[in-house]
Every structure is written in C-alpha cells, then in structure tokens.
Image (spheres, coloured by chain):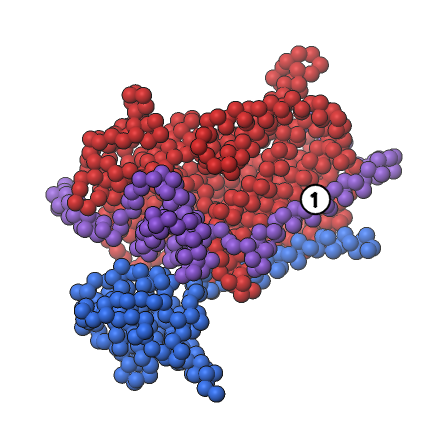
Chain colours: A blue, B purple, C red
Amino acid sequence: MDPVLKKKLLFISPLAVFSVMVILLFTGLGKDPTQLESQLIGKPIPEFERVTLMDTNQRVTDKDIKGPALLNVFASWCPSCYTEHPYLMQLQSQKAVTIYGLNYKDTVPKGLKFINDLGDPYDTIIFDENGRLGIELGVYGAPETFVINAENKIIYRHVGVVTDRVWQELIKPMLVDDLKGNTP
Amino acid sequence: MKQLTLAPIKVLSLLLIMAVSALTLKAEIIFYEFDDPVLEQRFNVLIQELRCPKCQNNNLADSNAPLSVDLKDIIYEQLHKGATDDEIISYLKARYGDFIYYKPPVKPSTWFIWFGPFALLLVGSFLVIRFLRSRSTTQSSTDDNTEKDSKDASMKLVEQWQSEAGDND
Amino acid sequence: MIPEIGNLALNFALAIALLQFILPLVGLSTNRWRLVLLAKPMATALFIFVSIAFAALAWSFYINDFTVAYVASHSNRFLPTAYRLGATWGGHEGSLLLWVFILASWTFAVAMMSRTLPAMTRARVLAVLGAVAIGFLSFILFTSNPFDRLLPIYPVDGSDLNPLLQDPGMVFHPPLLYMGYVGFSVAFAFALAALLEGRIDALWARWVRPWTLAAWMFLTMGIATGSWWAYYELGWGGWWFWDPVENASFMPWLIGTALLHSLAATEKRGVFKAWTTLLAIAAFSFSLLGTFLVRSGVLTSVHAFANDPVRGTYILVFLGIVVGASLLLFAMRASTVSVTSWFGALSREALFLWNNLILAVVTVMVLIGTLQPIIADLLELGKVSVGPPYFNMVFNILMTPLVFLVALGPVVRWREYSFSELVVKSRIAFVLALVIAAVSLLGASGKTGSEMAQVYLGIFLASWVTIMTFKEWWSQANRKSGFKWRKVNTSYYGMMFAHLGLVIVVVGVVLSSHLSVEKVIRMGPAQKQEVNGFVFEFVGITQRKASNFDALRGEFKVYKNDKLLATLNPEKRQYHASGQWMTEAGIDSSLFRDLYVAMGEQLPDSTDWAVRVYIKSFVMWLWLGGLMMAFGALISILDKRYRSRESK
C-alpha cells in the first residue's frame, strides 16, 4: 500500500471510530434500559397450585389457565395498577379477552379491598402471597401482563400499564396473528 | 424554638417508627444465619454476583428491594438443599435471563466482550513489535540527518535545560 | 434578586465565551493583532461572570432561598450549613454550574500563567476553551438552569438533600473529580492549538505537562475520594463496582496516565508527537463522554444524575461537534507534525509504547463493557449484564504486564539499552520478589488456589516494582561522588511516589479482596462474639438527635487478646424531611485492617440485632496509595524546569 495513503488512513481512523460510537449512542437515547424480556416466550405457564383471592378455600392450578387470555399481575401496593384497572374492567365488559389475575405479594384483606373498590375483571384471581409464583414467571414488578395464546403458551410479557393503545396496537394484533397462524 | 416544643412528639414518633419498623421487618429481614461457614461464603459470593432485576444496577447484596430479598431467600434455601452454585445460577437465569448474572456468558453474541480486548492487545502488540523491528535497520547516519533537519531552536533549548537539570528521568 | 443576578451573569458569560472563541481566531486569520490580544481579558471576564453566577447559587443555598426550584429540591431548613453549600453541586443543574465554574477557573489560570507562551498560541488555546464554555453555558441556560424560580407559589421547606450526600466525602468528591475531568481541557486546547499552528515540539510538550499533571492529580484524588466514600457510606464494604458512572471517571484517568507518559517522551525525545496529540484530544473527549453517559439515561446506573433524553441529545450533539471537529483537524494536520527520531526495541520510548498500548486496550475494554447494553440492544444480541466478575478478571489480566513493566521504566535508558545489562540489574530483585510473595502466602491459609495465586501475583508485582524503584534511585543518587538527595531531580521523586503509590494500591486491592472476612451475626445487648480472633461486644443502643435526622446509635467494643482496640458507633438514621432510613457504619481504621460494623435490622420479637461485621485487611492501602500517586504528581509539577522564565 502506498505509504502516504496508509498514513492518511491511519490518521482518519480515530474520527471514523468516534463517528461509529456517536451513532451507537444516538440509538440508545430515549430507550428504557431497564426493560427485561421474558424467558418464558413460547413456553407454557409454569406448573403451580395456589388458592384464589376471592375464596381462599378454592384452589387454582396452571391447568385452569386457558388461552387465548391475559394474565395480569397486580397488587394493592402498586400505584400504576390503580391507573390500569379501569381499562381492564372495560376490556372485560366488552368481552374482548379472558383476563386472569395474579395478586402478587399482597395480603388477602388488601387484595380484596382493591377488587371491591375497583371491580373484578378477572375470570380467576390467583393469590401469590409470597411472590414465588411471580418469580417462576420472571416477574420483577407490577403491573405486568402475560399474553397467552390458544395453545396455552406465553407469547409476550408486557411490562407496565395496559392502556387502550397497548391493547389495540400491540397485544390484540399479536393474538390475532397467532390465531391466524394456527388456523389452517 | 419550634424544635424544643416538638421534642416529645419526635420521641413518640421515633418509638412509633421503631414499632412499625419491627412489624414491617418481617418483609425486610436481611439476616441469614448460617451454621456452615462454607455455605455462608458461597452465599456472600453469589449475592454479590447476582443482579437485582428491578434495581438501577445493584447486586442482591446491596439491595433490600422485596424481590431481592425473595431471591436471597431462594438462594439460601437452595444452598441448604445442596444445590451447586451453577445450579442456583441456572435456576435464576431460567426465570430472569442471563441479565441476572453479572458475569456475561461466553457465547457468540458476547465474544466481542470476552475476546475483543485480548485480540486487540495481540494485534496491537504485533504492530508495536513490527514497528520496533523495522527501525533496527535504520540505526544509521541517515536517521541522524533527519533529526538534524527537523531540530529547531526549541529542541536545542530543551536539551540545554536537560543537561542543566541532570538527565535522570 | 440574587438568583436573577446569577442568571444574568450566566448570560453575560455566554456572550463573553462566544467572543472569546470567535475574536482571537478572526484576529489570527485577518492579522488584526488587537483582536488576538483580546483573548486574555475575555478569559478574565468569563471567570468573573461565572464566579458571580456560582456565588449566587451558593448564596441561595446558604440562605435557603426556596423560591429557587433547585434549592427547594435539594435543601432543607434543618440541613447543616456545610451540606447546604455542598448541595450546590448535589444535583444535575448545580453540578453543571460547578463544571463551568471550574472550566472558567482553569481558563483563567492558563491566561494568567502563560506569560512565556507566544501570544498567538495563547489566543488559540483560550479560543478552544471558550468554545467548550459556549457549549456548557448554553446547555445550562437552555435546558438546565439552576436559577429557575418557583414563584409565585413556593414551599416553606425544601425536600432535603439526599441523605447519602450529607457527608464530607460527598462534598469533596465532585469538585476534585471535576477539577480533573475539566482540567484535561487544557491539554485538549493545547493540542488543538498545536494542530492549528502545524507545529508540535518539545517546547509544546513541556508547556502541556504540568497542566496535565495537575488535572491527573485532581482526577486521582476525585476517584479515590469517591471510592473511599462508597466504602464507608454504603454499608457493605465495597469500594468499586464498575458502574457506568464510575467507569466514566476511570476512562479519562487511564488515558490521562498514558498521556503523561507519552508527553514525557515527546518532551525528552521529540517522539510520539501525533500520538500524544491524539491522547490529549482523547482524554478530554472521554471526560465529555462521561458527562453524556451520566445525564442522558442511556445506561442504567445508581449514580445517574439525570435520565433525560432531551438533555442527552444536547450533550451528544455538542460532544459530536467538539470531538468530531478535533479529530478532523487531527486527521488533516497530524501528518505534518509527526517526525520521529530513532529508538531501539529496548528503550524507554519502547516501554512507553507498551505502556500506552496496554492502557489504550484497557480503556477500550472498559468502554465496550460499559456500552455493551446499547450495542446488544442495537444488534439484538439479547440482554446480558456486564459487571464486576467480568471487569475484575479482564482488567487484572491486562494490567499485570503493565505493572510488571513499571519496574523497568526508570532503569531502561532513553534511545537504547542493553538487554543483558537489564538482566544483570534486575535478576536479584526478581528472585527476591518471588521469595517475598511466597512468604506472604503464609498469612493466607485456607484460601482457594485461585485466591492464593492472585495474592501471590499481587505481592510479587509490588515487591518487584518497589525493589527495582529503590535500587535505581539509590544508584542514581549515588552516582559519581557519593549520596546526595538532590542528584535526583524533583520530577524523579514525583515519579517514584506515583509508581510506589500504584503498587500500594495493588497490594490493597489484592489483600482486601482475598483476605477480608465478612460475617452477619446476631447479637443482643451486652453480648460478645468472636470473629477471626477479634471479640466484638455489643454494648447497647442509645438515641441521638441531630438537626435533620434521628438516630439509633449502637456502641460496639472490639477486643483482641483481651485488649480493647476500638469503640465503634454505627448508626441507623431516619431523616425528617424524606423519612428515609440510612445506615452509617462504625469503622476503626488502621494500616493493616479496618474493623467495620454496620447494623442491619432489629430481629422481630427480640432485642437482638442482625449486625454485619467486616474485618477488612489492608483496605487503607487503597486510599494511601491513591493519595501517594496524587502526591507524586504534585511534586512533579513543582520541578523547577516548569518554572524557568526563559522566553524565546
């Protein structure tokens, strides 16, 4: 290689490397670095057996969760859950989708108060007092919503509030696509 | 002045806080009692190398978030059940992903992390050695001529300072 | 009134910075000498106005003016005065003002202390510094103004400064750090001035060196203070976590160290001119990058000041322009200045090349490890965490050869050196170091093989460097006619302190990491328990009230062989304004071990407490070594060569 050209390339390389780095940093702006992807995508609900919140004499297991459905993780100590709940009530009144609830790291009195105050959109509410079921699901906060397809597999885990936009633009299309894909 | 009249209220509130803390302590216990010092050591290492999934870059040792405490409980239980460190880490990774362990796995998507620095060092060393070697043949008057050509007044001045100060460094 | 004065002063400062940047450069290209000479008075004016602004903010904190939004969110009526002043830089907006204040101070210092510098060069240097000031002042004025008011409705009391920051260490850490970060802007400005002039020579290097030494000294102290603070304040005995913000301060330090060595070679031998220039640009670039990472929200960090993508964009654009333009200038002009004189494969120049290579690779490693989440997100590689297990391992491996070479640097002469002579000079030291390291292992019983190997390696390297450094010093101080302290110049002593400080840090790292003991024990009042030969007695708990918190204060007595060694007072504090609880450790420091007690929680249905006890071996060596390195830099600055009054 021509030594003059070689030197020119050498001296311009720091600028080139720097430019790549700046572009990289630009892509990082505005994103939320704390979002985690679920490890259960494509897998069934983990095996479990728990009591329900509404009737602690009644038991619920993973076999009782039938898709297509949403599994919504909520708690009375979670402020955003209060924001989210009315929309879940709306979804249920429209019979848009079956919703199961997971009352996460809560107490029975507080969980019941939440439901009594805000309504019950859930088919069943699993009561997970010590949060171990949440850990099986890889839950790291509330609210979270798991999207379950017709074959009872988890196809998505939404972190944060389920709003109308989230439902219309993200979750519903997912369920629709999934159904289409599975109907010959 | 205001402070003095608030004093008894402050004491009362402190006692109340202590009482309340004692009640809420049930959820916040960070005391893990070990009979076996080997298990205790393994526990300490594990909770420093595992990440709190919801914190802003804290390990489990440094975090008292409820989820961290739950995970520490699980580690404690599994250690006492005889699980190996790898088994415990795999258990947590199966639920929270590679993210939960502060040591990145070695797989194609992380090769640039693990091997990149050493590759860079190797390439750099190769270049340095080649550079040093290439100059051994020019240890001759031609090089000194180049030096003379580019020497300017400032260089002469610096050399003068050096000889005054004693060139030990 | 005062906040308005502060705001006005900032506006004036921005205008002056603009003039400081434009006028001298215009004057240089149109041969208008008067414009060129304006650089120095502009720098003075900039300093005055920025000082006024900073003083206005500090005053607002002193009088607790809660009409100022920033004061309201970071102070409190019962916050002690010292911490109120520290709160000035406790948040995003105020810390930026501190940044600019320190930049203006360095600029002023350069303007004042450059009598022997040609006026043209000084004008260019001050113009570059003015450009940097423009960026930060406009960032403050447009996005992060500390003087924003809360009128007409303002709180009667403030939210209080984060309790974690109510601590002397946290008061000193940011200013020291910024003196370092920002101080590298001087070398940066000099590099650009040299590229603009198309000339880099030994005189330039001699000019830049003391400024770089000063910045490096402050950065070393800033990092050491931060690390020491984390150790005693956070309650778990750790002192470095490779958190993105920590890395953001470490990368300029690594580059700065490389720069110091490269500068020495450029000054002494006229070599590495282009590379030194690049390093000078890089050091400050990493400072700017750090400012970006800490405030933009692109990375997850406990330390992050702000998580605002708008502000992040602003800083990134500024970073892109400043560094991009500098690197473009470098690409265009560097070839005109790089003429290298000869040196052999074994020579001090060659050793400095290796030094720089390793430091550059380590810096890149830290950078890539820190940015990995962004890379992984962009390329959809899946989320992993890159933390201490990775960084510690790779860092230690890469640094080992570098520390080994530290012993040889002072011995190997410039230009060329004989390998056989080096072997003769070093073989006894080498063997001695191997033996000393083996002896030290006797104190490390019961450790795993890997831990023993690391202890061995660390002690070997420290002994090796120490013996060789003193050996060479002795022969230098004794040459020709017997021992004289002054046969060796000041700068040489500076180098010795810095190198010895480094290996003291190495010893501290290795021994505190592998020989320390940590135990959580359950103790009730008046109970005793033995940990590793020390007997800890929990005397009891009392209550303590301070102006803005209430504390439960524990008293612990520590005995060894029935002799009382120390009384420790860990506390659990609850701060009034926020309700936040904080744990303060009780620490007794000595040269060979720290006794460290942190109260955990009171156990339910019991008077027992869960208490964390640490016996941290040799941890003081970390801070002492850091101080020593900084001291070495200080001594080097005082070398009389930098005070020569010659002009050309």
Image quadrant where one finds the N terminus of chain A: bottom right
The vertical placement of B150 against C588, above or below, is: below
Residue C230 visible? no
Name, please, the residue furthest toward the top: C482
Residue C555 coordinates in the image, percent (x, y):
24, 32
Horizontal relation, residue A80 to residue C590: left or right: left
Q: What residue is at 53 percent from the left and 44 percent from the top?
A: C393
The vertical placement of A79 against B114, above or below, is: below
The vertical placement of C628 against B16, above or below, is: above
Q: Where on the picture, by quarter, is residue A36?
A: bottom left
Residue A14 coordinates in the image, percent (x, y):
66, 53
Q: What residue is at 36 percent from the left and 38 percent from the top?
A: B37
Horizontal relation, residue B139 to residue C185: left or right: right
Q: Name the residue under label 1.
A: B125
Name, please, the residue furthest toward the front: B82
Horizontal relation, residue A151 to residue C179: left or right: left
Name, please, the residue furthest toward the right: B141
Q: Name the residue nearer the viewer: B134 or C547.
A: B134
